[in-house]
Image (cartoon, helix red, strand yellow):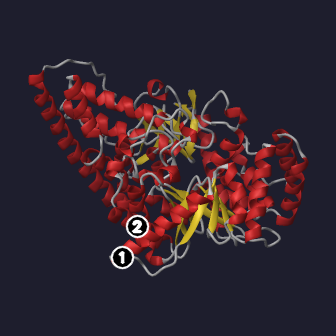
Amino acid sequence: MKIIKGKPVSSGIIIGKALLFNSHKEIVFKESIGEDAIQKEIDRFNNAVRRARAQLKKIYNNLQKTMGRDSALIIETQYLLLKEGNLANDIKHIITSEMVNTEWAIKEVEKKYAEIFSNIMDLSFKERINDISDVLSRLLKNLKAQKKDEAPVIENVILVADDIPPSTAANLMSSGKLLGLVLDYGGETGHTTILARTLEIPTILHTIDASRVIANDDLLIVDGLSGEVIVNPSKATIAKTIIKKEKFQVYQRQLNEVIKLPDLTKDKHPFTLLGNIELAFESDAVLAHGAKGIGLYRTEFLFLDPNIAFSQDQQYMIYKNVAKKIYPYPVVIRTFDVGRDKVYDSLQMDEAELNPALGIMAVRLFLRQKDMFKTQIKGILRANESGNIKLLFPMITEIEEIHTIKALVEEAKDELRRENKLPDRHIDFGIMIEIPGAVSLIKHLEHVVDFFSIGTNDLVQYSLAVDRNIDSVAYLYNPFHPGVVKILMEIREEISKIGKEVTVCGEMAGKPFTALMLLGMGYTNFSMTPLSIAEIKRVFTQVHYSYVKKTVKELSRLSSKTEIEEFLIETMLKKYPDLFIKQPLFQ
């Protein structure tokens, strides 16, 4: 028996046999070619593209049949990368300008995009490099004219791999016969992980060497709670695991009962829990977990490359379908939050940015590339047929930006009216508070914006000058820092004065300790990953708002993150001893 540890990203416990899958990363060598061979290489490349598009079309159709069109958008984006994006032109340019073989040109383009995406702060967007690498790997395989299957035939197995390309994962999961997933690598916000969570397939990432240690047909226990993979467990371990699995199922049933409770604390103070999504099909999970709408719809998935950003009509259909599914609850759609570096040549940046985290991004990019963003605005405005869509703009720095954006929105409305495409529905206009300097604007925005959202992830990073993705300084990223606590209290106070609605939509909203702190500050709207909703509701329905508010008021007198966190937890547990004890299986 061997135990392999990793990071659990989709909860659940499963016992089954292993099936190994090798993602077949191609080893490529550089070969120089003569001018007379350039056209031959271009023809080889074009043939590989045609085959790849046919393969993706087949996967798209299969996925659409089994999981619906929203899920198939993952594959549609890859298809568009080959049809309309920069990738093909970049590869052809390297072939002709450097006079090298197609395989080498593909690897050079992959390297270029990997370097670009590695500098992006937002994890969910950073991991979009996986979609590009997936497409390029498919081209390499087609160049070798390999006739092997796209993926293994699965029959109630636990798949073990170094990594799984998004298209392969979508193909496998749509079969409904994948019990679990164990990956050496992979990202928490990658499309493979999002699919697994949505389909409730127990998944563990970052095992480092599971694909080398585990053999085909090994019996595995995948514990998506502890993050352990147990290889060839003893009978006693299997028996303990079965008991643990049964306890977890009881806990899940209890949470399902919690979902049905009124959204009230013990002293009847109301709160609202919403869901964050990136992919349209996640809206099903939002409803299933009891959310009262979508508090943050990240749209970056629709923007891998400006040349292939989904058209106005395509975006309109995507947004409209999500809004109708969620109706009568609200859907807050955030415009493209991209551009923290010089990602694309076609964005026409003036110069390379030395500090992308403080450079051209989000609305700053919006105001430079107005036509591209106006396309998105029109798609959102048209989609508001059911009247429950709200429009959200990220990374606001100054009031002039807001006025300019609102003028552009009005332009878009006028153009749609002339085309008879604008629904006769009001749409709320909101901004994200993520930059500490923007807090001072709030008191001036009573008649300028309809609502606010707080992106706590970036707010904490910018407040403390810490990139939490850099291991050497990540320890400084802490939502209990006195400066962060003070800013959050100030935001709540200032928004209350002008009588506007505010939602917290960063990670703090989905974690019990920080969510309680926010509740005590007076925040009542929280948006989080759908899987966190029931647990946050369980905690909120067990406390008295008046007591939490009294406790949090004391935090302002404390001088360190350690004092604040310890005081909050100890005080709450003294009053509610069982508040953070989820279930006996974690003991």
Q: Residue at x 40, y 53 (%)?
A: 302
Q: Which residue is mark 2?
A: 378
Q: Is residue 409 left or right of residue 545?
A: left
Q: Is residue 348 above or below residue 408?
A: above
Q: Secondary structure at mark 2?
A: helix
Question: Quarter-wise, where is residue 25 in the image?
Answer: top left
Q: Residue at x 85, y 55 (%)?
A: 552
Indicate the position of residue 359 as horizontal and vertical percent values. Answer: 54, 41
- Of residues 183 and 505, the one nearer the viewer is 505
* Total numbered labels placed on residues in the image: 2
Q: Which residue is mark 1?
A: 421
Indicate the position of residue 33 as horizontal and vertical percent values. Answer: 16, 20
Indicate the position of residue 498 as horizontal and vertical percent values. Answer: 73, 70
- Of residues 304 and 579, the one nearer the viewer is 304
State the CA–CA distance, disc 2 to disc 1: 9 Å
Question: Quarter-wise, where is residue 564 in the image?
Answer: top right
Q: Residue at x 39, y 64 (%)?
A: 318
Which amino acid is tagged 2? Lys
Report if residue 147 is visible in the image: yes
* Mark found first going from the N terminus, 2 or 1: 2
Quadrant of the snapshot with the C terminus: top right
Instruction: Classify mark 2: residues with Cα within 10 Å, few (<14), some (14-19) or many (20+).
Output: many
Which amino acid is tagged 1? Lys
Quadrant of the snapshot with the N terminus: top right
Q: Is residue 539 left or right of residue 303?
A: right
Question: Quarter-wise, where is residue 518 in the image?
Answer: bottom right
Report if residue 146 is visible in the image: no
Q: Is residue 329 above or below residue 67?
A: below
Instruction: Classify mark 1: residues with Cα within 10 Å, few (<14), some (14-19) or many (20+).
Output: some
